[in-house]
Structures are given as C-alpha cells and as structure tokens.
Amino acid sequence: MSRKISIDPITRLEGHGKIEIFLDDDGAVEDCYFQIPELRGFERFVVGRPIEELPRLVTRICGVCPASHHMASAKAVDGCFGGEVAPLAVKLRRMYYNAHYIHSHIAHFYALAAPDFVLGPDADPAIRNVLGVVAKVGLEIGGAVIASRSKAQEIQRIIGGRSTQDIWCIPGGVAKGLKPEELEEIRPMVADLYEFTQFSLQLFRDIVLANPTYLDIIANGPYTLDVHNMGLVDENNAPDFYDGQVRVVDFEGTELHRYEARDYADYVAEHVEPWTYLKFPYLKQRGWKGFKEGIDSSIYCATPLARLNVADRMATPKAQEAFEEMFATIGGHPSRLLLAQHWARLVEMVQNAETLQLYCDDPEITGDQFRVIPQRVTGEGIGIVEAMRGTLTHHYTCDADAICTSANLIVGTTNNNAPIQMVTRKVAETLIQPGTDPDQGILNMIEMAFRAFDPCYSCATHSMPGEMPLRVSVRRGGEVTHEFRRGC
Amino acid sequence: MASDKLQIALYWGAACGGCDVAVLDTDAFILDVAAAADIRLWPIAVDGKYADVEAMEDGELDLTLFNGAVRNSENEHIAKLLRAKSKLLVAFGSCAHLGGIPGLANLTSREEILTAAYLANPSLERGNKTVPLAESGANGRTLTIPSFYRRVYKLDDIVPVDYYVPGCPPAFDQVKAVVQAVVGGDLPAVGSVVGASDKALCDDCTRVKSEKRIKHFYRPWQIMMDPEACLLEQGILCAGPATRSGCGARCTSSGIPCRGCYGPLPDVVDQGAKLLSAIVSVIDSQDPEEIERIVDGLPDFAGFAYRFSMPASLLQMSVRQ
C-alpha cells in the first residue's frame, strides 16, 4: 500500500515549510515535494511608493539579512537616477556589507551548522543545538562567538546608524559618513573579527577535518548535485559580494555565462508550480527542463560554495590560502559536495574580514563626500548583490516623478529552490529503503540537505541552534501507523 | 511539562525575522532568559513545534511574544492556538502591533499581488499561466499550502492581545525591559503599550528645533540635509511629531527621517490622520493655491502616513488614489 510521509512543519528556517514524501507500494520514494507556504507581495505593494523609500521598505523582506536587500535596492534605485554614486559611498557601503556578511556567517556556521559536526549528525536531538555546542566546546568559545557576532552588528550600527532594518543608503550615496573617532572605535573590532575567522578555520580543521566519519559524510554522502553554479565576480574572477559581473560555471568548471546585472532577464527565468508559493529560477537560455541533473541541466545553485566554484581565486591573501586548502582537501575545484558550503562560509568570512581591514586603513574612508545629488530621473535600475544565501536581484522602474511603477525580485534562496527540492528528494530516496520504515536517524540527514543551503524563505533563519524539530508520520491508507518525533 | 520556570513562547506570523534578531541582539541576556525560563516554542532558535503547543493545557504558557502580521490561514490558526495556551499574549513589533510594512499590501489587492508575482514580471517563464493554489494536484497527489488572505490583519484583529511592544524591530534595550517587567510581575494595565515612551519621537530626537514654517517639501534625495537641524523644518517629511518614542531616535540621528514604526502616540486612534494634521499645521501659508502647491510635494501620503499602520487605520485597506 502506498504511503505518505509528511514533515510539517519544518523549523529553523525563516518562515515555514513542509516536505511531503510519497512512497510506492514497495516503500520506495516515488515523489517528494518541498513546499513553501508564504507570500507577502512586496513586488506589488512597493508600487506607488517614492522610489527612494524602497531601500528602507524591502529590508522587511528579511530582518535577518536586511542589508542584502538594502544594498541591492539602493543600487537599483541609484540606477533609476542615472547610476551616479559618490565613490566614497561605494566604499562605505562595501565596508558595511563586509560586516554584515561576517555577522550572518558566524550565526549560520555556529548556530545552525556546527551542532551537526561538533555533536554529530546522530547526536541526541535534545542537545544537538547551539547550547549543546557551547557545553561541548566551553563557555569561553561560546562567549567569543556571541561577542564576535555582536561586534559585526555594532560595526554596522556605527557606520550606518542601525544594524537591523537598515536605513542608511539614499540615492547617490549614504546618509552619513564615517567620523574619524567612529573609525577608531571600529578598528579594534575588525582586528578581533579577523582573528576570529582564523580561529574558526582552525576549529573546522580540528573538529571536522580530523574526524573521518564527518569527512565521509561530506565526500561520500548523498549530498551532491550535478547542477551549475552562479555568483558575482570582480574583474579578476574573485568573489565580489557587493558588485561585479554574474558568472555561471557548470559543474565541470566551464564558464556558461558572464553578464552585467542589467542583462539578468536574458539569462535567468522563473518557473512556477501550483503547489508552492516559491518560484524556481533556471538558466533561461536552456529553458525549463524540470528537476533534472546533468551537464545539460538548466538548474543552478547560488550559495557560498557556488560563489567559490565560479571564482578562480579569492580577492585577499589569507582567504586565498583558505580557498586553496579547501579545494585541495575536497577533491578539486569546482566541487559538487554540498556540505562543503559550511567550509566555504568560513573562507568567505576571511575575505570579508581582510577587506574590512583594508577599508580601515584607507585614508579617504572618513571623508565627507559621501553623497551626490541625483540630477535626473532615468526611470529604471537593476541592482545585484550576493546575499549570504545567493545572488540577489532587485529590478525597479519608476515614473518621471520617481514613483515606483514596477518591481521584480529574485531573492537569494529562491535561486536554490530547485536544488533544495532535488537534494531533499535524493537524500530521501537514498535513506528511505523499500521494506523498512524510516527511523529517527534519517530526520537529521534530511535536514542536513537543506541546512547546507542556509535557506531563507522570505529571509534566513541562521540565528540559533542547529537541530530542527521534525515530525514524520507514516500513513497507510490515511491512518498513521508510525510517528517519529525529534525535538518535540 | 512540570517546571517552576517561566514558560514562554516566541512565534512569527507574516514576519521578516527582524524581531527575532532584536531578541538575539540582547546578546548574553538571552542566556539569562534561557536560565530563568523554558522556551517552549521559538522556531528560529529552539526545538518545539505545533504538535507540542496543541498538546498543552490552556494557559500553560505564561507568556507568548508574537511577532508578524496575519496574512494567511496558517498565521491565523497558530495565533488562535497560542492565544488559548497563553496567560499573556504580547503583540511584539510593528507587524503584530499595527500590521507593519507587510500591511501596505492593504493598499493593493490579492489579485494584483498574485499577478505581480506570478503572471507579469520580466523574469517569468514565457507564457506562464500557473498561480499557486491552496490545493493542487501533481502526479495524482493532492498538495496543500495555506490560503493567502485578501488583506493583512494585525494580531488583535484575530485574537485578544494583552500587551503591545512597538517597533520595527523593537530596540533591544526595550526588549530587555519588557522581559524583565514580565519576570518581575511589574506590568501596567492590560491593553497597554509597553517598552516605549508616552512622548513623541521629537522629544528624544536631538536635532535642533526652531519654528516650523514650511514653504516647500523636498524628498530626501533632492537636497543635502543639514546634519543638525530638524528634518521637518528642512522640508523633509518626518513622522516624528505623530510617532511614539522609545526607539532611541536611531533613524533621525543617522540623517534619515522617521517613518513611524513605534506607532501612534497614546490615545491617538489613527496615526496617519494625526500625522496629516501635524504636517498641515506647519505649512506656512494661508493661500489655498500656494497650499496646494506645497502639498503637491508630498507624493504617496497614504504610503507615508500609514507606513507601519495601514491595517490599524480607520481605512484599514484598499485606498484608491
């Protein structure tokens, strides 16, 4: 008799989601749906608002990574006024965004990902969370994690006035500059954050790389997909989080596309399914081919690992060392090992910390030319940044009075909707074998599939413990025959 | 669950996660909360799920902090469930308090939202006619997702609320104050706003104020703003005069005008109407034509005046300009 396994609700991701797994008569996985039940309608209700208000409206898409939306929006709005931005403002925005990246990656790595590796994928669910991590690694390290995330938030507050629900970018620049005394306040925090990135890499070596079981899960588990990679790169093909060109590289390392933000609609399109509110972006020139892997697939990932996969190198020296070490360890560049995302986040953190240091030493950074007044309304702008969870696109149009007339958004995690759908199914197919009932142990393995993506459904939930409470109900003919619970 | 500790839940409806980050931004204080309380439900952070809540006795939770608006059937279901299980239900943050920025959707319609998202934008698959449905079929299966309501509701449109904590997000020092008040039993009358001031934002804003006589309104992108002077006196729309303080004036001190996230002043029913009267009173003219010219500098007044409070306004929804 066929069965359905419902995982509903999943938590520890921003918003709500559920997984429906349908089994055939033999108990093998026949169908699997990862459904997103949310929609808020930003693309419509920003229409009619003054265009300069959008950067402080769209932050409410995501209160965990609001700076990503703030920056993409600011760039799109700049475009609506002809695109001129004070050069100092670009530096300050980049500096601010570096701090935001560090805050986000610390939160995800330590609170969401670390429990699986520090405590183990099959650890007691009751302790497989950040408090369990702190108990194992000690209060000293736990305190350093809290303090470091807090410093990354504080740097944003000092530069831009707020750290959550950013307000600071306005057309042509930013609303306030950085005073010399503020820079001196930031400088020691930046030094501490750089040290913390090195500490984190060492922790990863000591705890994950030194454990053959974990390495085996990363390298030989079902967590791989033959799909392509997307990310922003600078002119040297190093990752650029704030600007640059979008580069798409297939899983064998061949460049498929390299394009400017303004051309995004020639390269990416979105497929709609009736059973989820979240759309499925794909490579437009290949057409929608369904949830199919392979060299001809039109599916891509936009994640920390994808960003490193499309990059030839890192932009800063210590990050380059970390990049080389990572790809040498996981079997070469590019990589399809989705669990290497967690390591990739640490590599990205290093580049962000080193870049922050460079800005702290920039003699121009405390200047006062942080804005230019736009001279004309040109009516259309497209801003792309790398959100922590993927390439983020904001595309606006406005009328001659600079009132928004349309908005189109392709949000970081949305890019990964199809890959998450596919890897969830793959893990379920691998672990749910015909003739056996899935036990509690598979639940965390299913979670680990989408947790690697740090999914952000309407934004991200990369803020605290890692163990996700799940309930799996096995039904026969509508009757619940088995129920497995974890963390609930 | 037998425990002498305070039993608490934190939940999000139609939300962005910013309120949860505001709680996390209390840093080490969160460890004190964890020591003093059992956190029974907090999807972003700890274990616990709907089935646990359903299994609780009515009133088993001492406190629920509910952030986010009510946008779909799932939000409504959980709001009612948590109300039944909680001795104190707090509307936490602008969306639960007043509808918040998602509440701006009440200026448009369900159909327009679905069209913008799925039927008419530059990156949709060519020829797409598919729109997500509350119930759909795929390969002979029935799949369901929550139904998307015609409008946004604030929390107390759905269930009775005991206290309101304003802010988008609430300032983290205010978050601490609210939790300490609950722990200490030091709470005002039911229905009160807590974690905020009873004065206007202008009282906390350090910008230099003089006589407000506006001859011309500017949009923030049009002029270099004086870093010290009152923004409204410079002709920049600022919601400070009609907004409750308590946020620490974090926007105006950074060169950005207030948009009213802490909600209306005490005893004010409609924040936008109050704001309109405040703005009109500073226009420096008796000449109807000149007044009209000055007011023309104020595009999208509804979207400004009700930035965080459309579902709480007298209009509530669907203003056609």
Image (cartoon, rainbow, N blue to C red):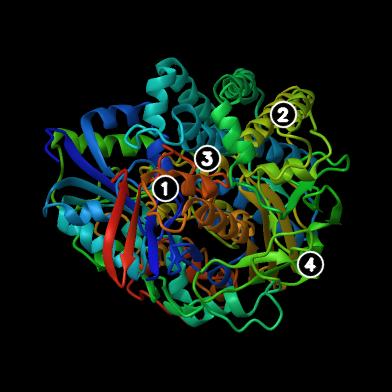
Residue B264: where, in percent of width, then height?
A: 33, 57
Decide if residue A468 is on the left or right side of residue A422: left
* Quarter of image, res B314: bottom left
Q: Residue at x 68, y 64 (%)?
A: A292
Labels 1 and 2 share a subunit: yes
- Residue A162 image label: 3
Nearer to us in this view, A75 or A193:
A193
- Of labels 3 and 4, earlier in sequence is 3
- Of labels 3 and 2, earlier in sequence is 3
Labels 3 and 4 share a subunit: yes
Give the structural element (helix, strand or loop) at label 2. helix
Q: Which residue is mark 4?
A: A378
Q: Which residue is mark 2?
A: A329
Nearer to us in this view, A333 or B199:
A333
How many angstroms separate mark 1 from mark 2 (CA)?
28 Å
Q: Which residue is mark 1?
A: A443
Compared with residue A102, is residue B84 higher up or lower down, i.e. above or below? below
Nearer to us in this view, B308 or A433:
A433
- Of labels 1 and 2, earlier in sequence is 2
Residue A165: where, in percent of width, then height?
A: 51, 48
Give the number of the mark in front: 3 or 2. Answer: 2
Compared with residue B133, is residue A12 higher up or lower down, i.e. above or below? above
Give the amino acid at mark 1: Leu
Position of the N terminus of chain B, as image quadrant, is top left
Q: Residue at x 59, y 59 (%)?
A: A422
Give the number of the mark in front: 4 or 2. Answer: 2
Crowd class of label 4 (few under 14; some 14 to 19; many from 20; radius 10 Å): some
Q: Are marks 4 and 2 in contact (CB under 8 Å)?
A: no
Give the number of the mark in front: 3 or 1. Answer: 1
Give the amino acid at mark 2: Thr
